[in-house]
């Protein structure tokens, strides 16, 4: 029905925001960098794994925080009448977290000139997704959203096989390198969850709960990242130094 379509649209628009404004920019930069490394006979695997470690931490933080603040996020942005979008949004956030180790697969396959495998993956994924939505929609919106997880798991499995065949990079080796990212994000999301629980129990307004939880999660993330010397901190320092050098130059 129209209400279910509206609920799905609200939930997917929030999830798509991350990919539209953040992930797509990273992929567009990573693709030529990986291609240059490949054509220059340099190691693609090391740069790929390093990028995944950095980006997975940010992706897990974003979607983890979105999952625990979904009720407040939907209320503040759309109003209480769209509360049915909360579980759909949380399912989407879960899928976003699953996607983190595979975020640069398309960039890697493109850099390696593997257009054929990408086309086959997208075709299979589209067919499985349509089937899952058709089955789920015959029961409920929530069932349809939940079954899209199955379709995405199929897509991730296909990407795993393709990247191994094309570049020799195994998904297992990528995931093994994500220990620090997982620990940092687990601490941040746990802290955010605790702060949200406290604010909700004290009866604060949803927008205060949303801001307080977000600040706690980001603060805990940065503190934990510094404590474990996560590679993201080094990248942030490089970015800060680059911006400082540019802004510090005299204009003439």
Image (spheres, rainbow, N blue to C red):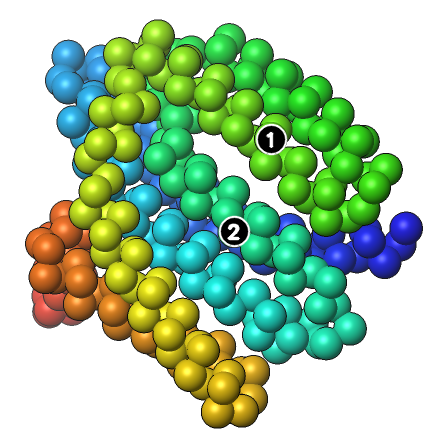
Label 2: few (<14), some (14–19) or many (≥20) C-alpha neighbours in 10 Å: many
Residue 211 seen in the current view: no
Q: CA distance from mark 1 to mark 2?
A: 14 Å
> Mark on residue 41?
none
Disc on the earlier residue, 1 or 2: 2
Measuring from the top left, give residue 87's x and y in whole percent. 64, 57
Residue holding disc 1: 150
Looking at the picture, does residue 127 appear above or below residue 252? above
Quick check: 231 left or right of 161? left
Quick check: 83 left or right of 112? right
Quick check: 7 left or right of 200? right
Given residues 128 and 31, the one toward you in this image is 128
Measuring from the top left, give residue 109's x and y in whole percent. 39, 18
Question: SS class of the residue under badge 1?
Answer: helix
> Mark on residue 93?
2
Looking at the picture, does residue 26 appear above or below residue 211? above
Residue at 72% over, 49% down: 142
Residue at 35% over, 35% down: 101
Measuring from the top left, give residue 223's x and y in whole percent. 17, 67
Residue furthest right as drawn:
1
């Amino acid at each position: 029905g129209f209400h279910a379509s509206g609920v799905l649209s609200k939930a997917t628009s929030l999830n798509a925001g991350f990919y539209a404004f953040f992930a797509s920019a990273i992929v567009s930069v990573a693709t030529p960098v990986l291609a240059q490394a490949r054509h220059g006979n340099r190691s693609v695997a090391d740069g790929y794994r390093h990028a995944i470690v950095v980006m997975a931490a940010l992706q897990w933080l974003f979607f983890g925080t979105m999952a625990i603040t979904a009720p407040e996020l939907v209320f503040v942005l759309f109003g209480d009448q769209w509360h049915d979008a909360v579980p759909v949004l949380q399912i989407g956030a879960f899928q976003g977290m699953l996607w983190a180790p595979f975020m640069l697969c398309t960039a890697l396959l493109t850099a390696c000139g593997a257009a054929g495998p990408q086309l086959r993956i997208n075709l299979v994924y589209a067919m499985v997704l349509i089937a899952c939505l058709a089955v789920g929609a015959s029961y409920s919106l929530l069932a349809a959203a939940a079954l899209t997880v199955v379709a995405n798991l199929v897509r991730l499995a296909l990407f795993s096989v393709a990247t191994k065949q094309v570049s020799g990079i195994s998904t297992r080796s990528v995931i093994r390198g994500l220990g620090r990212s997982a620990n940092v994000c687990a601490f941040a999301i746990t802290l955010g969850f605790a702060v949200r629980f406290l604010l909700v129990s004290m009866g604060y307004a949803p927008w205060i709960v949303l801001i307080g939880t977000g600040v706690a999660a980001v603060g805990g993330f940065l503190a934990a990242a510094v404590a474990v010397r996560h590679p993201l901190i080094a990248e942030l320092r490089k970015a800060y130094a680059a911006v400082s050098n540019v802004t510090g130059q005299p204009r003439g």
